[in-house]
Image (cartoon, helix red, strand yellow):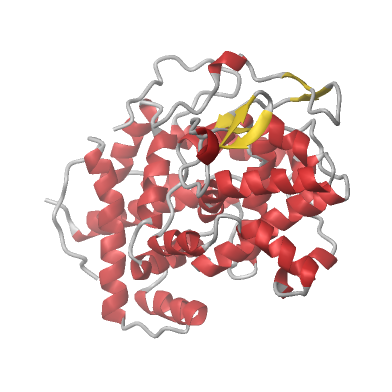
């Protein structure tokens, strides 16, 4: 993993002079390197340059982008382009993290909406360079994704979900394992692992998982999962296929606990 | 030996943990700077289909859309949405400054959710310094 933070910049707070806006403090100094960028940029002497020309390490200066967004139209376009090239994959991931049930093309539409919203804000001088760029961008992305999901699914509130999770874990072997996770303050990392495991599942398993997740705390029967999948995708899976996918989903979640050393592997059949 | 009942309870518990991964947080809460940094350093996973879509998008994808929308409406969705009012920016800013118009949750409810989430994850109370929570990345 490359070093993504420019430590030479201390807290990242500072006054920028872009030549068109003097003395503006931008409270975000994280330098970024994209995981999936198509064209690499770096900042050289305060100017954003194409790394394919300079062979410098790929880095995006969030300060610089924030200032570009409050510049003239050409500068705004440059800022939008930098966000697109450097953060596209991260924004996709942020949206996927809250919108498991969306198809990939819907996710792309959501990404378009995010970029359009940023563009509009820049054009209409509503972009606030006093706000740190990245938290703002990711908050916006998450909200866009959630809005899309809410059109498709119905969910109970977070508090009820948390209560139900606690209840479901009580007096179980899985719950015992989770207590160790929590005692080691490893909860967030394990939830990240669960999330990544689900997102990376083959499509059928992922769709079954999304129905189970959206339905929680209700425990949906195989037939209910089958019907909901049909409603969402038009695909008519057999109950056997749904059962097989659900078993794999659960096995892969359990596997995360096993691999992290919190639980022993257990071989058993889906008894339903 | 696991009884059928215990087995069913464990399956339910696994479902709960999976739900926790996606639904244990208030989805309307703003992304903090710390979290934003973490997201950039460790980008969330994408599905194989997401990766395919990403790979199919040109490097100047958004610029192309903007140009097309300006020129001749080749990207009608983008153009159409450009014309539509968009409250998302205002909402995102409002969230980052706490509170959002039309929010269903008040501050007390948010605190309660955060307390329960922290208990579930074994995280210290807000403001408390966590000691020894360095975990390896394995």
| Residue B133, x across and y down, in percent | 41, 21
Q: Is residue B89 above or below residue B117?
A: below
Pick whichever, B60 or B2, lies toward us: B60
Decide if residue A240 is on the left or right side of residue A11: left
Whether residue B21 is visible, yes or no, is: yes
* Image spot of residue B47 (x, y percent): 41, 59
* Residue closer to the observer: A18 or A5: A18
Image x and y of residue B83, in percent: 84, 67
Q: Quadrant of the C terminus of chain A?
A: bottom left
Q: Quadrant of residue A188?
A: top left
Q: Residue most toward the front?
A: A53
Would you identify the image quadrant in which residue B111 lies? Answer: top right
Q: Residue at x 62, y 26 (%)?
A: A44
Left or right: B14 in relation to A80:
left
Can residue B28 be spotted in the picture? no
Position of the N terminus of chain A by quadrant? top left
A206 versus A179 height, above or below: below
Name the residue at 77% across, 34% down: A67
- Is residue A215 toward the left or the right of residue A134 in the image? left
Q: Nearer the viewer, residue A28 or A215?
A: A28
In this view, which residue lies farthest toward the left? B1
Q: Is residue B7 above or below residue A23?
A: below
| Residue A167 x %, y % | 43, 48
Label total for image:
0
């Amino acid at each position: 993993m490359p070093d993504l933070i420019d430590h030479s910049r201390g807290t990242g707070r500072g006054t920028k002079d872009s030549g068109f806006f003097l003395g503006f403090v931008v409270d975000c100094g994280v330098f970024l390197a994209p995981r999936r960028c198509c064209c690499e940029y770096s900042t050289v002497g305060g100017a954003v340059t194409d790394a394919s020309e300079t062979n410098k390490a790929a880095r995006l200066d969030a300060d610089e982008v924030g200032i570009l967004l409050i510049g003239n139209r050409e500068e705004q376009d440059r800022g939008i382009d930098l966000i697109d090239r450097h953060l596209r994959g991260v924004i996709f991931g942020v949206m996927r993290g809250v919108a498991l049930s969306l198809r990939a093309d819907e996710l792309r539409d959501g990404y378009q909406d995010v970029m359009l919203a940023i563009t509009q804000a820049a054009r209409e001088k509503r972009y606030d360079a006093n706000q740190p760029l990245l938290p703002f961008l990711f908050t916006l992305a998450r909200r866009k994704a959630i809005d899309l999901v809410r059109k498709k699914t119905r969910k109970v509130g977070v508090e009820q979900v948390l209560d139900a999770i606690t209840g479901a874990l009580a007096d179980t072997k899985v719950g015992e394992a989770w207590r160790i996770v929590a005692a080691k303050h490893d909860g967030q990392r394990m939830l990240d692992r669960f999330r990544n495991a689900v997102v990376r599942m083959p499509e059928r398993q992922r769709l079954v998982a999304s129905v189970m997740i959206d339905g929680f705390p209700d425990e949906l029967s195989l037939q209910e999962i089958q019907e909901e999948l049909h409603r969402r995708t038009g695909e008519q899976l057999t109950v056997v296929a749904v059962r097989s996918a659900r078993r794999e989903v659960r096995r892969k979640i359990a596997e995360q606990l096993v691999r992290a050393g919190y639980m022993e592997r257990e071989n058993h059949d889906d008894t339903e | 030996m696991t009884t059928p009942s215990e087995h069913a309870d464990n399956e339910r518990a696994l479902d709960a943990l999976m739900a926790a991964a996606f639904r244990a947080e208030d989805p309307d809460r703003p992304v903090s700077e710390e979290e934003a940094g973490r997201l950039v350093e460790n980008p969330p996973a994408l599905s194989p289909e997401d990766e395919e879509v990403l790979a199919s998008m040109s490097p100047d994808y958004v610029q192309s859309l903007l140009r097309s929308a300006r020129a001749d409406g080749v990207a009608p969705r983008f153009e159409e949405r450009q014309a539509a009012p968009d409250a998302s920016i205002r909402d995102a800013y409002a969230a980052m400054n706490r509170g959002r118009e039309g929010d269903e949750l008040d501050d007390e409810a948010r605190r309660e959710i955060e307390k329960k989430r922290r208990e579930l994850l074994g995280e210290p109370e807000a403001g408390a310094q966590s000691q020894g929570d360095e975990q390896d990345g394995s």
